[in-house]
Amino acid sequence: CVVDLLRPMNAAGGERYYRTDTHWNERGAKAAADAVAAALRAAGLAPAQKAEFRVSHDPERERVGDLIRLAGLDRVPYPLRPRGDDEAATVIEQSAAADIGLLDETPAPQLTVIGTSFSRRANFVPFLSLALTAPVENAAEDGGGVANAAIAYFAKPEFRKTPPRAVVWEIPERMIEEPVSASDADWAAALGAEKPVK
């Protein structure tokens, strides 16, 4: 299924992106995670695994975003550069998995996220875990474009041995109309030509 995040992001109100960064902030990431969790439930793809989480907040501090870093100003002290975003980051820690004993082997998560730096910023995947009350593997990559994380993840022996119940493939809107690289096209063609694993 495809989850269009425009409506839930608009409904979240307030600032949904960092002022000094191209990524969504925690408000935007949580709105996106809640919408994806709802779509997974509606499609019958939510993980059956359950986990408990502890939620706390770090003290507020300045977060220097990628726009400041790309301008080469991240080592320049404020006020000689633009002020970063003030953020009291949410800390989401898995405290226990339901029905898992102390000496039991922990099973692999039934849900994996692949994609870009959007899935690695502002607690998107931890918010998704919290919304689903389930562990979620984060296999996204910084600077990997649309397909790099997918290519790496689907090639892992662990994926073939114990595939998840569902994979969330996060693709930023700005990348949808980018031309497909030759290497990505070759990978997609090879993937389509593979025989199903029995």
Image (cartoon, rainbow, N blue to C red):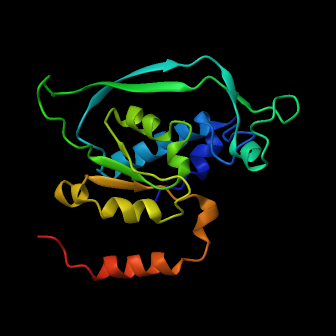
In this rendered view, identify the residue nearer to me: 23 or 28.
23
**Residue 113 relative to residue 157: left or right:** right
Q: Which percent across, then down, holds residue 80?
A: 88, 33
Instruction: Name the residue nearer the viewer: 73 or 29.
Output: 73
Q: Quadrant of the C terminus?
A: bottom left
- Residue beneath the point at 17% across and 57% down: 161
**Res 114 quadrant in image:** bottom left
Where's the N terminus, which quadrant? bottom left
User: Do we see residue 1 in this rendering?
Assistant: no
Position of residue 135 relative to residue 87, above or below, is below
In the rendered view, would you say 105 is above or below 147?
Answer: above
**96 horizontally vs 139: left or right:** left
Residue 35 appears in the rendering: yes
Residue farthest along the front direction in this orientation: 75
Residue drawn at (31%, 35%) of the image = 134
| Residue 85 sits in quarter | top right
- The spot of residue 196 in percent (x, y) is 19, 74
Foreground pick, 89 / 143:
143
Q: Residue at x 32, y 76 (%)?
A: 191
- Residue found at the very far right of the displayed protein: 80
Above or below, comparing residue 28 to residue 155 in the picture: above
- 191 relative position to 175: left or right: left
Residue 74 in picture, x, y percent from top left:
74, 38
